[in-house]
Image (cartoon, helix red, strand yellow):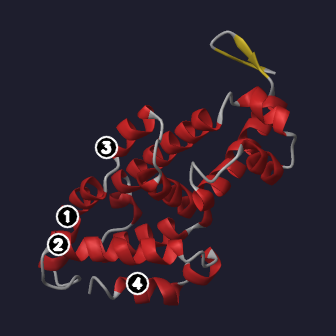
């Protein structure tokens, strides 16, 4: 056991908590807040429902924690896009691949579910204001304009083109196509053609 803030941390405890969160991410991504029951999360995690409640007092608490992680992951990915590669088109290509990875896909889908689910916890509503499509697109516009200036991206309104790009990716994710079918060089290049 290690110490964090003067308290003992049990590795087995953290492992179970992580397992529950991973299962919950998958279930919430596909069923939303309203369509998910703690029993579904427990079944996906392969543990008892009672044990699930020892780690999270309610599905709302668990959902809120996962939305928080998803928002942080999205902001980190966008913020670090410039370190992935040197050219705007390569940076967008890497971003596309990352969005289509299974774990990132589920984070993205849980944010979509949070946006369309009625009666989400108040903390989730606050988090979603930070992660609006408009904010994400606005963060990418300078990169896109640079790509347009050097001929890597097609002409046109950057916001409109990026909105179309993200709409296609969202549509693909909602089709529940396995990530391995989408996250390959050929599929990524087809998606990138929207911007070229």
| Mark 1, residue position | 141
Q: Which element type, helix, strand or loop, lies under badge 3?
A: helix
In terms of depth relative to the viewer, which is nearer, 43 or 169? 43
**Residue 103 in view of the camera:** no
In percent of the image, x 62 and y 54: which residue is there? 35
183 vs 165, left or right, is right
Image location of residue 130, percent across then percent down = 32, 43
| Mark 2, residue position | 158
| Mark 4, residue position | 191
Q: Give the vertical position of 176 relative to 130 (above or below).
A: below
Mark 2 or 4, nearer chain start? 2
Q: Which element type, helix, strand or loop, lies under badge 4?
A: helix
What is the spatial separation of the Cα atoms under label 4 and label 3, in whole angstroms?
Answer: 27 Å
Q: Give the vertical position of 54 relative to 146 (above or below).
A: above
Residue 184's disc is: none
What is the spatial separation of the Cα atoms under label 1 and label 2, in whole angstroms?
Answer: 6 Å
In terms of depth relative to the viewer, which is nearer, 54 or 120? 120
Image location of residue 58, percent across then percent down = 66, 32
Q: Which element type, helix, strand or loop, lies under badge 1?
A: helix
Mark 1 or 2, nearer chain start? 1
Query: In the image, which is nearer the foreground, mark 3 or mark 1?
Result: 3
Instruction: Say if mark 2 contacts mark 4, CB within 8 Å.
Output: no
Query: In the image, which is nearer the foreground, mark 4 or mark 3?
Result: 3
Instruction: Say if mark 1 contacts mark 2, CB within 8 Å.
Output: yes
Residue 129's disc is: 3
Mark 4 or 1, nearer chain start? 1
Q: Which element type, helix, strand or loop, lies under badge 2?
A: helix
């Amino acid at each position: 056991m290690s110490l964090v803030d003067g308290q003992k941390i049990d590795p087995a405890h953290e492992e179970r908590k992580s397992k529950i969160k991973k299962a919950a991410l998958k279930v919430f991504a596909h069923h939303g807040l309203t369509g998910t029951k703690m029993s579904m999360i427990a079944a996906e995690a392969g543990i008892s429902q009672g044990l699930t409640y020892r780690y999270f007092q309610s599905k709302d608490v668990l959902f809120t924690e996962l939305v928080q992680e998803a928002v942080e992951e999205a902001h980190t990915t966008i913020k670090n896009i410039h370190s992935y590669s040197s050219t705007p088109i390569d940076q967008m290509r890497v971003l596309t691949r990352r969005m289509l990875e299974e774990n990132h896909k589920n984070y993205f889908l849980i944010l979509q579910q949070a946006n369309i689910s009625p009666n989400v916890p108040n903390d989730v509503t606050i988090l979603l204001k930070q992660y609006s499509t408009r904010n994400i697109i606005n963060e990418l516009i300078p990169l896109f304009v640079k790509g347009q200036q050097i001929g890597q991206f097609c002409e046109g309104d950057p916001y409109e083109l990026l909105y179309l790009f993200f709409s296609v990716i969202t549509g693909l994710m909602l089709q529940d196509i396995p990530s391995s079918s989408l996250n390959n060089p050929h599929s990524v290049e087809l998606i990138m053609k929207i911007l070229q």
